[in-house]
Image (cartoon, rainbow, N blue to C red):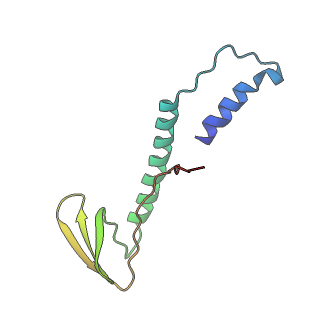
Amino acid sequence: MIASAKAACNVAQAAKWGVEVRKSIINMPAIILRKEKVVESFRKGSQKGLEKTENLSLIFGEASFTDAKTIEVVLNEGGTEMLTASKIFIDVGTRPLIPILKV
């Protein structure tokens, strides 16, 4: 999205360089779609690297702790799996969020 903002900024300032732009439209759905494709490409690349890592189990689903060292995972493919370990690393993913601020 930053690249799109820079492009829009360049268009807005084009007259400084002797370039006349008659019409400029910001297409937010197209910008968001492009961003999602870029993010998905990075995710797939990262996932492929993780899948090749020895002694690593990549599990997709929703997990919750049943005690300090055990989690129950509801697997995306169906079923559940209980996992026990002294250390558990959970990659929960993330989405950007603009918080609502009260001024």
Residue drawn at x 82%, y 18% as measured from the top left: 18
Q: Which quadrant of the figure has residue 76?
A: bottom left
Where's the N terminus, which quadrant? Answer: top right
Residue 32: give x, y in percent of width and height: 49, 37
Taking the image as shown, residue 46 lies to the left or right of residue 72, namely right
Residue drawn at x 21%, y 58% as measured from the top left: 77
Residue ranking furthest to the front? 103
Taking the image as shown, residue 7 lies to the left or right of residue 83, namely right
Q: Compared to 74, does 69 lie above or below? A: below
Residue 58: give x, y in percent of width and height: 34, 67
Residue 91: give x, y in percent of width and height: 41, 66
Closer to the camera, 44 or 8? 8
Taking the image as shown, residue 2 lies to the left or right of residue 50, namely right
Residue ranking furthest to the left? 79
Closer to the camera, 34 or 98? 98
Residue drawn at x 77%, y 18% as measured from the top left: 19
Q: Which quadrant of the figure has residue 4?
A: top right
Closer to the camera, 4 or 49? 4
Q: Compared to 98, does 18 lie above or below? A: above
Taking the image as shown, residue 9 lies to the left or right of residue 66, namely right
Residue drawn at x 82%, y 24% as measured from the top left: 16
